[in-house]
Protein backbone atom coordinates (compact mmCIF):
# COMPACT_ATOMS: atom_id res chain seq x y z
CA UNK A 1 0.00 0.00 0.00
CA UNK A 2 1.31 3.36 -0.98
CA UNK A 3 2.06 5.94 1.67
CA UNK A 4 -0.69 8.26 0.45
CA UNK A 5 -3.26 5.52 0.59
CA UNK A 6 -2.05 4.48 4.04
CA UNK A 7 -2.41 8.09 5.24
CA UNK A 8 -6.01 8.25 4.03
CA UNK A 9 -6.85 4.98 5.77
CA UNK A 10 -5.35 6.21 9.06
CA UNK A 11 -7.24 9.49 8.91
CA UNK A 12 -10.47 7.66 8.16
CA UNK A 13 -9.84 5.30 11.11
CA UNK A 14 -9.21 8.23 13.45
CA UNK A 15 -12.46 9.92 12.41
CA UNK A 16 -14.40 6.74 13.07
CA UNK A 17 -12.68 6.39 16.48
CA UNK A 18 -13.39 9.99 17.48
CA UNK A 19 -17.04 9.66 16.48
CA UNK A 20 -17.37 6.48 18.53
CA UNK A 21 -15.78 8.16 21.55
CA UNK A 22 -18.10 11.13 21.23
CA UNK A 23 -21.17 8.90 21.17
CA UNK A 24 -19.86 7.07 24.19
CA UNK A 25 -19.43 10.39 26.04
CA UNK A 26 -22.95 11.50 25.22
CA UNK A 27 -24.54 8.25 26.26
CA UNK A 28 -22.82 8.16 29.69
CA UNK A 29 -25.40 9.38 32.24
CA UNK A 30 -24.51 12.73 33.78
CA UNK A 31 -26.50 11.93 36.95
CA UNK A 32 -27.59 14.28 39.68
CA UNK A 33 -29.94 12.94 42.39
CA UNK A 34 -30.34 9.67 40.44
CA UNK A 35 -31.73 11.36 37.31
CA UNK A 36 -30.24 12.23 33.98
CA UNK A 37 -29.64 15.94 33.60
CA UNK A 38 -31.25 17.43 30.60
CA UNK A 39 -33.54 14.47 29.94
CA UNK A 40 -36.70 16.33 31.04
CA UNK A 41 -37.35 14.37 34.28
CA UNK A 42 -40.72 15.52 35.61
CA UNK A 43 -41.41 12.85 38.25
CA UNK A 44 -41.61 14.29 41.79
CA UNK A 45 -40.14 12.34 44.72
CA UNK A 46 -42.47 10.04 46.61
CA UNK A 47 -43.02 10.97 50.28
CA UNK A 48 -43.51 8.01 52.60
CA UNK A 49 -43.15 6.90 56.25
CA UNK A 50 -44.14 10.33 57.59
CA UNK A 51 -43.84 10.33 61.38
CA UNK A 52 -43.87 12.69 64.37
CA UNK A 53 -41.76 11.60 67.33
CA UNK A 54 -39.84 12.88 70.37
CA UNK A 55 -42.63 15.30 71.25
CA UNK A 56 -41.86 17.46 74.28
CA UNK A 57 -43.39 20.61 75.77
CA UNK A 58 -41.51 22.83 73.30
CA UNK A 59 -40.33 20.65 70.41
CA UNK A 60 -41.26 17.85 68.03
CA UNK A 61 -39.28 15.89 65.43
CA UNK A 62 -40.81 15.18 62.01
CA UNK A 63 -39.27 12.51 59.79
CA UNK A 64 -40.07 11.02 56.39
CA UNK A 65 -38.42 9.25 53.46
CA UNK A 66 -38.36 9.89 49.72
CA UNK A 67 -37.58 7.46 46.89
CA UNK A 68 -34.91 9.81 45.54
CA UNK A 69 -32.69 12.48 47.00
CA UNK A 70 -34.55 15.69 47.72
CA UNK A 71 -34.66 18.71 50.01
CA UNK A 72 -36.56 18.82 53.33
CA UNK A 73 -39.20 21.42 54.15
CA UNK A 74 -41.83 21.65 56.93
CA UNK A 75 -44.54 24.30 57.19
CA UNK A 76 -46.30 24.45 60.55
CA UNK A 77 -48.36 26.61 62.85
CA UNK A 78 -50.95 26.65 65.60
CA UNK A 79 -54.22 25.25 64.38
CA UNK A 80 -56.09 28.51 64.67
CA UNK A 81 -53.30 30.54 63.04
CA UNK A 82 -52.44 28.52 59.93
CA UNK A 83 -49.02 27.44 58.68
CA UNK A 84 -47.17 30.63 59.50
CA UNK A 85 -43.78 29.09 60.33
CA UNK A 86 -41.34 26.89 58.46
CA UNK A 87 -38.15 24.89 58.87
CA UNK A 88 -36.16 23.55 55.95
CA UNK A 89 -32.90 22.10 54.68
CA UNK A 90 -31.49 22.32 51.15
CA UNK A 91 -29.40 19.18 51.60
CA UNK A 92 -30.33 16.42 49.15
CA UNK A 93 -31.16 13.22 51.01
CA UNK A 94 -33.65 10.36 51.08
CA UNK A 95 -33.94 10.35 54.89
CA UNK A 96 -35.49 13.58 56.15
CA UNK A 97 -35.44 14.69 59.80
CA UNK A 98 -36.44 18.16 60.99
CA UNK A 99 -36.89 19.16 64.64
CA UNK A 100 -39.29 22.01 65.34
CA UNK A 101 -38.33 24.10 68.37
CA UNK A 102 -39.80 26.97 70.35
CA UNK A 103 -43.28 25.45 70.43
CA UNK A 104 -45.90 26.20 73.07
CA UNK A 105 -46.73 23.54 75.64
CA UNK A 106 -50.08 21.75 75.39
CA UNK A 107 -50.77 23.23 71.95
CA UNK A 108 -52.10 21.63 68.74
CA UNK A 109 -50.11 22.29 65.57
CA UNK A 110 -50.92 21.69 61.90
CA UNK A 111 -48.08 20.83 59.57
CA UNK A 112 -47.23 19.58 56.10
CA UNK A 113 -43.92 18.48 54.59
CA UNK A 114 -42.53 18.89 51.10
CA UNK A 115 -39.46 17.68 49.22
CA UNK A 116 -37.96 18.89 45.94
CA UNK A 117 -35.51 16.87 43.84
CA UNK A 118 -32.51 18.24 41.91
CA UNK A 119 -34.64 18.77 38.82
CA UNK A 120 -37.11 20.98 40.68
CA UNK A 121 -39.88 18.38 40.95
CA UNK A 122 -41.69 18.84 44.26
CA UNK A 123 -44.05 16.68 46.34
CA UNK A 124 -46.22 18.05 49.17
CA UNK A 125 -47.87 15.93 51.86
CA UNK A 126 -51.39 16.36 53.11
CA UNK A 127 -52.16 18.41 56.20
CA UNK A 128 -51.45 16.61 59.48
CA UNK A 129 -51.28 17.60 63.13
CA UNK A 130 -49.68 16.88 66.50
CA UNK A 131 -49.97 18.24 70.03
CA UNK A 132 -47.10 19.17 72.31
CA UNK A 133 -46.97 17.86 75.85
CA UNK A 134 -48.54 19.95 78.55
CA UNK A 135 -46.24 21.60 81.06
CA UNK A 136 -45.40 19.74 84.24
CA UNK A 137 -46.92 21.58 87.19
CA UNK A 138 -49.39 21.58 90.02
CA UNK A 139 -52.44 23.19 88.38
CA UNK A 140 -55.38 21.59 86.61
CA UNK A 141 -54.37 20.81 83.04
CA UNK A 142 -50.66 20.35 83.89
CA UNK A 143 -48.91 17.02 83.59
CA UNK A 144 -48.58 15.69 87.11
CA UNK A 145 -44.98 15.79 88.41
CA UNK A 146 -43.42 12.35 88.67
CA UNK A 147 -41.89 11.20 91.95
CA UNK A 148 -40.52 8.14 93.70
CA UNK A 149 -41.14 7.43 97.39
CA UNK A 150 -40.86 4.47 99.74
CA UNK A 151 -44.10 2.73 100.65
CA UNK A 152 -45.01 1.25 104.01
CA UNK A 153 -43.03 -1.90 103.14
CA UNK A 154 -39.92 0.00 102.06
CA UNK A 155 -40.54 -0.53 98.34
CA UNK A 156 -39.97 2.27 95.82
CA UNK A 157 -43.21 3.48 94.21
CA UNK A 158 -43.34 6.04 91.37
CA UNK A 159 -46.25 7.82 89.78
CA UNK A 160 -44.86 6.69 86.42
CA UNK A 161 -45.48 3.08 87.49
CA UNK A 162 -49.17 3.58 86.59
CA UNK A 163 -49.40 4.73 82.95
CA UNK A 164 -52.94 4.87 81.58
CA UNK A 165 -54.47 4.68 85.07
CA UNK A 166 -56.54 7.15 87.03
CA UNK A 167 -54.44 8.00 90.09
CA UNK A 168 -55.53 9.75 93.28
CA UNK A 169 -52.76 11.40 95.33
CA UNK A 170 -53.76 12.45 98.83
CA UNK A 171 -51.38 14.51 101.03
CA UNK A 172 -51.85 14.15 104.79
CA UNK A 173 -50.23 13.68 108.22
CA UNK A 174 -51.42 12.09 111.46
CA UNK A 175 -51.68 15.24 113.61
CA UNK A 176 -53.88 17.04 111.05
CA UNK A 177 -57.52 16.64 112.23
CA UNK A 178 -59.10 17.25 108.79
CA UNK A 179 -56.66 14.73 107.28
CA UNK A 180 -57.60 12.07 109.80
CA UNK A 181 -61.31 12.83 109.38
CA UNK A 182 -61.23 11.98 105.67
CA UNK A 183 -59.08 8.84 105.93
CA UNK A 184 -62.14 6.76 106.79
CA UNK A 185 -63.85 7.96 103.59
CA UNK A 186 -60.78 7.10 101.53
CA UNK A 187 -60.58 3.70 103.20
CA UNK A 188 -64.24 3.03 102.46
CA UNK A 189 -64.03 4.35 98.92
CA UNK A 190 -61.45 1.74 98.05
CA UNK A 191 -63.22 -1.17 99.70
CA UNK A 192 -66.99 -0.65 99.51
CA UNK A 193 -67.87 2.25 97.22
CA UNK A 194 -69.16 1.18 93.77
CA UNK A 195 -66.55 2.98 91.72
CA UNK A 196 -66.82 1.80 88.11
CA UNK A 197 -63.10 1.54 87.46
CA UNK A 198 -61.15 1.56 90.68
CA UNK A 199 -58.22 3.99 90.41
CA UNK A 200 -54.80 3.82 91.97
CA UNK A 201 -54.72 5.47 95.39
CA UNK A 202 -51.47 6.89 96.76
CA UNK A 203 -51.69 8.59 100.14
CA UNK A 204 -48.56 10.63 100.79
CA UNK A 205 -47.64 11.18 104.41
CA UNK A 206 -45.83 14.45 104.99
CA UNK A 207 -42.65 14.72 107.08
CA UNK A 208 -43.35 12.01 109.65
CA UNK A 209 -41.25 9.03 110.64
CA UNK A 210 -42.29 5.90 108.79
CA UNK A 211 -42.09 3.77 111.95
CA UNK A 212 -44.47 6.07 113.84
CA UNK A 213 -46.94 6.20 110.95
CA UNK A 214 -46.96 2.41 110.59
CA UNK A 215 -47.78 2.06 114.26
CA UNK A 216 -50.48 4.74 114.07
CA UNK A 217 -52.12 3.11 111.06
CA UNK A 218 -52.06 -0.33 112.67
CA UNK A 219 -53.62 1.07 115.86
CA UNK A 220 -56.38 2.79 113.86
CA UNK A 221 -56.80 -0.18 111.49
CA UNK A 222 -56.06 1.70 108.29
CA UNK A 223 -54.83 -0.27 105.29
CA UNK A 224 -54.51 2.58 102.80
CA UNK A 225 -51.44 2.46 100.52
CA UNK A 226 -49.09 4.98 102.12
CA UNK A 227 -45.92 6.63 100.82
CA UNK A 228 -43.50 8.65 102.93
CA UNK A 229 -42.50 12.16 101.84
CA UNK A 230 -40.14 12.65 104.75
CA UNK A 231 -38.50 15.83 103.40
CA UNK A 232 -41.70 17.33 101.98
CA UNK A 233 -40.18 17.40 98.48
CA UNK A 234 -43.20 15.88 96.71
CA UNK A 235 -45.60 18.21 98.53
CA UNK A 236 -43.44 21.07 97.25
CA UNK A 237 -43.68 19.75 93.67
CA UNK A 238 -47.47 19.73 93.99
CA UNK A 239 -47.59 23.21 95.56
CA UNK A 240 -49.44 21.92 98.62
CA UNK A 241 -50.09 24.97 100.81
CA UNK A 242 -52.04 23.16 103.53
CA UNK A 243 -53.29 19.67 104.36
CA UNK A 244 -55.21 17.66 103.36
CA UNK A 245 -55.09 18.14 99.63
CA UNK A 246 -55.99 15.60 96.95
CA UNK A 247 -55.07 15.47 93.26
CA UNK A 248 -56.97 13.46 90.66
CA UNK A 249 -54.73 12.38 87.78
CA UNK A 250 -56.48 11.32 84.55
CA UNK A 251 -55.36 8.48 82.29
CA UNK A 252 -53.31 10.85 80.13
CA UNK A 253 -51.23 11.88 83.14
CA UNK A 254 -52.72 15.34 83.54
CA UNK A 255 -54.19 16.82 86.71
CA UNK A 256 -57.95 16.90 86.11
CA UNK A 257 -59.26 17.88 89.54
CA UNK A 258 -57.98 19.12 92.89
CA UNK A 259 -59.71 18.79 96.24
CA UNK A 260 -58.74 21.38 98.82
CA UNK A 261 -59.49 20.20 102.33
CA UNK A 262 -61.12 16.97 103.44
CA UNK A 263 -63.85 15.00 101.68
CA UNK A 264 -67.29 15.15 103.28
CA UNK A 265 -68.39 11.68 102.18
CA UNK A 266 -67.48 8.53 100.34
CA UNK A 267 -69.92 9.54 97.60
CA UNK A 268 -67.97 12.73 96.92
CA UNK A 269 -64.91 10.62 96.15
CA UNK A 270 -66.96 8.20 94.08
CA UNK A 271 -68.53 10.96 91.97
CA UNK A 272 -65.20 12.64 91.25
CA UNK A 273 -63.54 9.39 90.18
CA UNK A 274 -66.45 8.28 88.01
CA UNK A 275 -66.37 11.65 86.24
CA UNK A 276 -62.71 11.07 85.37
CA UNK A 277 -63.43 7.52 84.16
CA UNK A 278 -66.11 8.72 81.76
CA UNK A 279 -65.30 12.20 80.49
CA UNK A 280 -62.23 13.91 81.98
CA UNK A 281 -63.13 17.34 83.25
CA UNK A 282 -62.23 20.36 81.20
CA UNK A 283 -62.02 23.02 83.88
CA UNK A 284 -61.53 26.58 82.71
CA UNK A 285 -60.69 28.02 86.12
CA UNK A 286 -58.44 29.79 86.26
CA UNK A 287 -59.31 31.19 82.86
CA UNK A 288 -55.77 31.46 81.59
CA UNK A 289 -55.08 33.12 78.26
CA UNK A 290 -51.95 34.87 77.13
CA UNK A 291 -53.01 37.86 79.19
CA UNK A 292 -55.52 37.02 81.95
CA UNK A 293 -56.09 34.65 84.86
CA UNK A 294 -59.21 34.38 87.03
CA UNK A 295 -58.45 32.61 90.30
CA UNK A 296 -61.08 31.64 92.90
CA UNK A 297 -59.87 32.28 96.45
CA UNK A 298 -60.64 30.26 99.58
CA UNK A 299 -60.09 30.55 103.33
CA UNK A 300 -59.79 28.16 106.27
CA UNK A 301 -62.52 27.57 108.83
CA UNK A 302 -60.88 28.34 112.21
CA UNK A 303 -63.08 25.76 113.96
CA UNK A 304 -62.08 22.63 112.07
CA UNK A 305 -59.35 23.72 109.66
CA UNK A 306 -61.35 22.81 106.55
CA UNK A 307 -61.29 24.98 103.45
CA UNK A 308 -64.16 27.33 102.65
CA UNK A 309 -64.48 28.02 98.90
CA UNK A 310 -65.94 31.05 97.12
CA UNK A 311 -64.28 33.60 99.40
CA UNK A 312 -63.32 35.82 96.51
CA UNK A 313 -62.02 36.11 92.96
CA UNK A 314 -58.63 37.40 91.90
CA UNK A 315 -58.13 38.60 88.33
CA UNK A 316 -54.66 39.42 87.05
CA UNK A 317 -52.70 39.63 83.83
CA UNK A 318 -50.04 37.01 83.13
CA UNK A 319 -47.76 39.13 80.99
CA UNK A 320 -46.99 42.83 80.64
CA UNK A 321 -44.80 45.67 81.79
CA UNK A 322 -46.93 45.98 84.96
CA UNK A 323 -48.82 43.46 87.07
CA UNK A 324 -52.48 44.49 86.89
CA UNK A 325 -54.83 42.93 89.42
CA UNK A 326 -58.31 43.14 90.96
CA UNK A 327 -59.47 41.18 94.03
CA UNK A 328 -63.12 41.12 95.03
CA UNK A 329 -63.47 39.26 98.35
CA UNK A 330 -65.86 38.85 101.27
CA UNK A 331 -66.11 37.21 104.68
CA UNK A 332 -63.04 39.02 105.94
CA UNK A 333 -62.40 40.68 109.27
CA UNK A 334 -64.23 44.01 109.16
CA UNK A 335 -62.34 47.32 109.29
CA UNK A 336 -59.04 45.47 108.97
CA UNK A 337 -56.04 46.23 106.79
CA UNK A 338 -55.13 43.43 104.34
CA UNK A 339 -52.16 42.99 102.00
CA UNK A 340 -52.04 41.08 98.74
CA UNK A 341 -48.64 39.39 98.42
CA UNK A 342 -46.68 37.01 96.27
CA UNK A 343 -45.40 34.27 98.56
CA UNK A 344 -42.50 31.91 97.83
CA UNK A 345 -43.48 28.88 99.98
CA UNK A 346 -40.01 27.93 101.12
CA UNK A 347 -37.52 30.53 102.32
CA UNK A 348 -35.80 32.57 103.23
CA UNK A 349 -35.16 33.70 99.68
CA UNK A 350 -34.78 37.10 98.09
CA UNK A 351 -38.50 37.26 97.30
CA UNK A 352 -39.95 35.33 100.24
CA UNK A 353 -43.01 37.62 100.24
CA UNK A 354 -43.44 40.55 97.86
CA UNK A 355 -46.13 43.15 98.50
CA UNK A 356 -48.54 43.76 95.63
CA UNK A 357 -51.13 46.06 97.23
CA UNK A 358 -53.10 46.86 100.39
CA UNK A 359 -56.66 47.87 101.32
CA UNK A 360 -59.02 47.92 104.32
CA UNK A 361 -62.05 45.63 104.49
CA UNK A 362 -65.31 47.50 105.07
CA UNK A 363 -67.75 47.04 107.95
CA UNK A 364 -69.29 44.05 106.14
CA UNK A 365 -65.95 42.29 105.72
CA UNK A 366 -65.86 42.96 101.97
CA UNK A 367 -62.87 44.25 100.08
CA UNK A 368 -62.13 45.47 96.55
CA UNK A 369 -58.41 45.69 96.01
CA UNK A 370 -57.21 46.69 92.57
CA UNK A 371 -54.18 48.31 91.06
CA UNK A 372 -51.19 48.14 88.75
CA UNK A 373 -47.64 47.68 89.98
CA UNK A 374 -44.25 47.32 88.34
CA UNK A 375 -42.89 44.31 90.22
CA UNK A 376 -39.56 44.42 88.35
CA UNK A 377 -39.52 40.62 88.48
CA UNK A 378 -41.23 37.59 87.05
CA UNK A 379 -43.52 35.45 89.17
CA UNK A 380 -42.00 33.22 90.35
CA UNK A 381 -38.50 34.59 90.27
CA UNK A 382 -35.70 32.27 89.16
CA UNK A 383 -34.11 32.61 92.61
CA UNK A 384 -37.20 31.27 94.38
CA UNK A 385 -37.59 27.65 95.41
CA UNK A 386 -40.98 27.43 93.69
CA UNK A 387 -39.47 28.29 90.29
CA UNK A 388 -40.68 27.32 87.69
CA UNK A 389 -43.78 25.68 89.19
CA UNK A 390 -45.77 28.84 89.86
CA UNK A 391 -46.49 31.73 92.20
CA UNK A 392 -48.91 31.74 95.14
CA UNK A 393 -50.79 35.01 95.62
CA UNK A 394 -52.01 35.36 99.24
CA UNK A 395 -54.22 37.92 100.94
CA UNK A 396 -52.87 38.29 104.48
CA UNK A 397 -53.42 40.59 107.43
CA UNK A 398 -51.09 43.55 106.94
CA UNK A 399 -49.90 43.20 110.53
CA UNK A 400 -48.54 39.75 109.62
CA UNK A 401 -46.40 41.11 106.77
CA UNK A 402 -42.97 42.59 107.53
CA UNK A 403 -42.08 45.13 104.84
CA UNK A 404 -38.41 45.20 105.81
CA UNK A 405 -37.70 41.46 105.91
CA UNK A 406 -40.36 40.58 103.29
CA UNK A 407 -41.63 37.76 105.51
CA UNK A 408 -45.09 36.65 106.63
CA UNK A 409 -45.46 35.52 110.24
CA UNK A 410 -48.64 33.44 109.55
CA UNK A 411 -50.07 34.49 112.91
CA UNK A 412 -53.71 34.69 111.74
CA UNK A 413 -54.15 31.94 109.15
CA UNK A 414 -57.93 31.84 109.50
CA UNK A 415 -58.09 35.43 108.26
CA UNK A 416 -56.13 34.80 105.04
CA UNK A 417 -57.34 34.08 101.53
CA UNK A 418 -55.52 31.43 99.49
CA UNK A 419 -55.53 30.90 95.70
CA UNK A 420 -57.05 27.77 94.22
CA UNK A 421 -54.29 27.79 91.61
CA UNK A 422 -50.83 29.22 91.22
CA UNK A 423 -49.83 31.47 88.34
CA UNK A 424 -46.80 32.48 86.29
CA UNK A 425 -46.37 36.13 85.35
CA UNK A 426 -43.84 37.42 82.79
CA UNK A 427 -42.56 40.98 83.22
CA UNK A 428 -41.99 42.15 79.65
CA UNK A 429 -39.64 44.91 80.81
CA UNK A 430 -37.07 42.30 81.82
CA UNK A 431 -34.72 41.48 78.90
Image (spheres, rainbow, N blue to C red):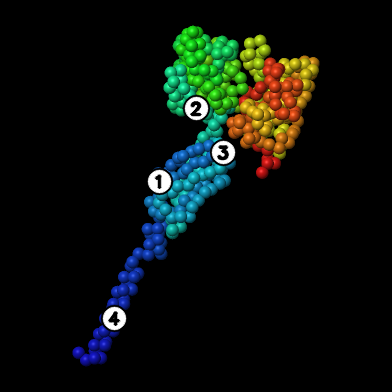
Q: Residue furthest left?
A: 1
As drawn, 322 above or below 185: below
Residue shown at the point (56%, 10%) measured from the top left: 181
Residue shown at the point (60%, 27%) measured from the top left: 284
Q: Secondary structure at mark 3?
A: loop
Q: In screen coordinates, is 82 left or right of 200?
A: right
Q: In screen coordinates, is 361 left or right of 122?
A: right
Circle 3 residue: 104
As drawn, 88 above or below 171: below
Circle 1 residue: 48
Q: Position of residue 173 (x, y in %)?
A: 55, 16
Residue shown at the point (49%, 41%) measured from the top left: 60
Q: Secondary structure at mark 1?
A: strand
Q: Position of residue 54 (x, y in %)?
A: 46, 39
Nearer the observer, disc 2 or disc 3? 2
The alpha-carbon separation of the residues under discs 4 and 1 comes to: 52 Å
The alpha-carbon separation of the residues under discs 2 and 3 comes to: 24 Å
Circle 2 residue: 147
- The numbered mark, 4 or 3, whose residue comes first in the sequence reads 4
The alpha-carbon separation of the residues under discs 2 and 4 comes to: 85 Å
Amino acid sequence: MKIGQLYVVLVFAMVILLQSWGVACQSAPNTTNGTVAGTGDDTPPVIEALNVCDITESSATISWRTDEEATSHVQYGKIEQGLARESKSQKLTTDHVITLKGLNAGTSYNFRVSSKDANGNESVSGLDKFMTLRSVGCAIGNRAPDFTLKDINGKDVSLSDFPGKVVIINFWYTTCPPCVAELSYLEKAFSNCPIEEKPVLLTVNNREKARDVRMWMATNQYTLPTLFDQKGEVAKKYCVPFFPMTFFIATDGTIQDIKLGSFASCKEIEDTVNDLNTTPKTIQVPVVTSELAQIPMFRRDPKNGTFVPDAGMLECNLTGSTFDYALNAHGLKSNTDYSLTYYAPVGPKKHTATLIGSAIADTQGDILLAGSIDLEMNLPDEKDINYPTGAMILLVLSEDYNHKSKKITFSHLSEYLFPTYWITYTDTDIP
